[in-house]
Amino acid sequence: IFNNIEQLPPDALFGIKQRYSKDTRSHKVDLGIGAYRDNNGKPWVLPSVKLAEHSIHSDPSYNHEYLNISGLNAFTTGASNILFGPDSIAIKESRIVSNQSVSGTGALHIAAKFISKFFPEKKIYFSKPTWANHQAIFQAQNLQCDSYPYWDAATKSIDMEGYLNAIKTAPRGSVFVLHACAHNPTGLDPTNEQWANILDMLNMGDHLVLFDSAYQGFASGDLNKDAYAVRLGVEKLSDNVPIFVCQSFAKNVGMYGERVGCFHLVLPRQSNEDETAKVKAALSSQLNKIVRSEISNPPAYGAKIVAQILNDENMTNQWHKDMVTMSSRIIKMRHSLRDKLNELGTPGNWDHIVSQTGMFSFTGLTADMVKRLEEEHAIYMVSSGRASIAGLNEHNVDHVAKSIDEVVNH
Ligand code: PMP
């Protein structure tokens, strides 16, 4: 019965990881997967995570019981507070429903399930380009996916005119997925002024907004700065339409494999408090139903670690330092690569490597150049030319710059 089932090609990103692992060249460099590495190219357990782990394991009442269906309350409340901010009107008016999720991907999946159940006719718009998994997650729920212009290859900047025009012409009440900060893969974020224009235009079309927040604090080292768009969105839109937010702690706490995330649904303002409580209870029951039939209840360990960090002042302070450590090393590597390419006189302007933000740089290298980097220089990155800057360090940046110079020149 299985003989006619077609074999699919390997996942583009995890396929790179596999080829990299098998490569025996000692000078190989992994610029594929978006995971932080230290200056020796090694994974980094954050000092704040070590403190939290120590504290959890020295608690004699520690156990491995199930969490609630909606997750660990200390975690979801802390997660909501850092994202929406202490002065959030939505928190004050108790208008947010939060469910712990299987990292950011799980939060997006909950959003997709929820939309497909209650608004199956809505079209979902993604930036062009976007994170490779976005469309796959929503298409798996039979939702109709489309894109809005984002990256302008000629100017290496955001195509604002195309972007705003797509919002204007989309069917009223569509869903727009926005990267809260550190856009993946381009590393290009709107300015504060551009965000205001985008959100106003979305409001005019009664569109629903889904913020994907996978890099808060990791991009700039500052949680508030990286939450600017989400908070402005709540301020500008949430009188009118609901807002979905999918939050990941994979990068900013380095909990990649522990799958720590949260899905938040910000309700539009209701006529009175009782109505808010009623709608909130109904939505919470529906979200819990989705979670119950799929994972029963979310994974506990990583959420306990993050809850400790968010609720203990000492650990929170250490975490802020950890985010600065990660973001500043990445920024330093951006400068180092750009400077070396300039010193080599590599044709083209490489300033975008420095001006882009977050984990990635959309280098502008062609698929053919990327292929040659892998085959001839043992440097691995996505064929779109996206490089994970976290994979660069003081020991390999010379080799990477010389290799880029070689493939660009030949
Ligand atoms: N959204 C974006 C834009 C991402 O880049 C990622 C991670 N690469 C995610 C969501 C989700 O990641 P995770 O499931 O590991 O939290």
Image (cartoon, grey):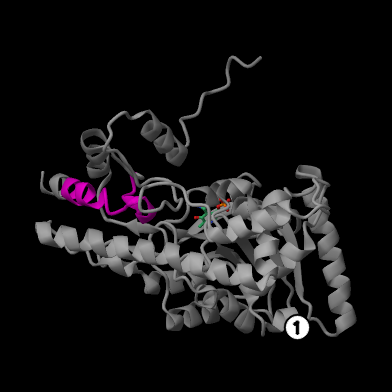
Residue 342, by quadrant, is bottom left
Q: Quadrant of the C terminus?
A: top left
Q: Secondary structure at mark 1?
A: helix
Q: Quadrant of ligand 1?
A: bottom right
Left or right of residue 244, residue 365 in this image = left
Q: Is residue 230 above or below residue 108?
A: below
Residue 397, magenta (yes or no): yes
* Residue 120 appears in the rendering: no
Horizontal arrangement in the rendering, residue 405 relative to residue 83 (left or right): left
Q: Which residue is at the front of the view, 114 or 403? A: 403
The magenta stretch spans residue 306? no
Judging by the rendered image, the residue that carries numbered circle 1 is: 92
Name which residue type carries label 1: Lys
Give the image location of residue 60, x and y in percent. 81, 52
> Where's residue 238, x and y in %?
67, 79
Give residue 344's position: percent from left, percent from top. 10, 56
Instruction: Classify residue 175 by image quadrant.
Output: bottom right
Res. 8 visible in picture:
yes
Highlighted range, magenta: 383-404
Above/below status of 160 relative to 22: below
